[in-house]
Image (cartoon, helix red, strand yellow):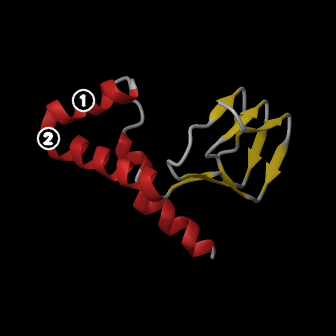
Amino acid sequence: MPNQVEHIDETFTGETVVLDGKVYRECAFVQCILVFRGEAPFTLTGNMVDATCRWRFEGAAALTASAMKSIYHGFGEQGKRLIQATLDIAPGSASPSDFSPESHTDQALEQG
């Protein structure tokens, strides 16, 4: 994708990192908030994400995540299969409800 900012072998610590429109290769993220707004695609390749990092979905990405959560929980097994197929998730692994945009936004706001 043209005009993408590329980060190679960088370490981000305690930062809010907006992913949209960027490329991250072999980077490390420690105690970060990773933000996706749904404004532009991004690329993640060979990165290390510390367990203390959190995801936050904003704007169009938050609306999409919320819609997918509603489908997953509101349409029974058919909804679950649709979202699992869309995300290529194996049954029994992390579900879309584990990535609720509301909970991640609240966590980020608590840090203020």
Q: Quadrant of the N terminus?
A: top right
Q: Residue at x 72, y 55 (%)?
A: 31
Q: SS for tag 1? A: helix
Q: Is residue 10 left or right of residue 45?
A: right
Q: Position of residue 60 (x, y in %)?
A: 43, 53
Identify the residue at horizontal 16%, vertical 47% (top origin). 74
Q: Is residue 36 left or right of residue 14?
A: left
Residue highlighted by disc 1: 82
- Amino acid type at circle 2 is Phe
> Mark 2, residues whose alpha carbon is within 10 Å: few (<14), some, or many (≥20)?
few
The residue that mark 2 highlights is: 75
| Label 1 close to label 2 by CB (< 8 Å) | yes
- x, y percent for residue 96: 37, 42
Between 105 and 18, the one lying in front of the other is 18
Q: Residue at x 71, y 38 (%)?
A: 4
Q: Residue furthest front?
A: 2
Q: Nearer the viewer, residue 85 or 2?
A: 2
**Image location of residue 82, percent across then percent down:** 24, 29
Residue drawn where x is 70% and y is 44% of the image: 50
**Does any portion of residue 92 appear in the rendered image?**
no
Q: Residues within 10 Å of mark 1 (few under 14, many from 20)?
A: some
Question: Could you say whether the residue bearing mark 2 is in a helix, strand or loop?
Answer: loop
Image x and y of residue 20, in percent:
61, 46
Q: Earlier in the sequence, mark 1 or mark 2?
A: 2
Q: CA distance from mark 1 to mark 2?
A: 9 Å
Q: Quadrant of the C terminus?
A: bottom right
Is residue 55 among what the camera can see?
yes
Q: Look at the picture and state if 71 lies above or below 88.
A: below
Q: Amino acid at mark 1?
A: Leu
Please give left or right for residue 97 compared with residue 71 in the image. Answer: right
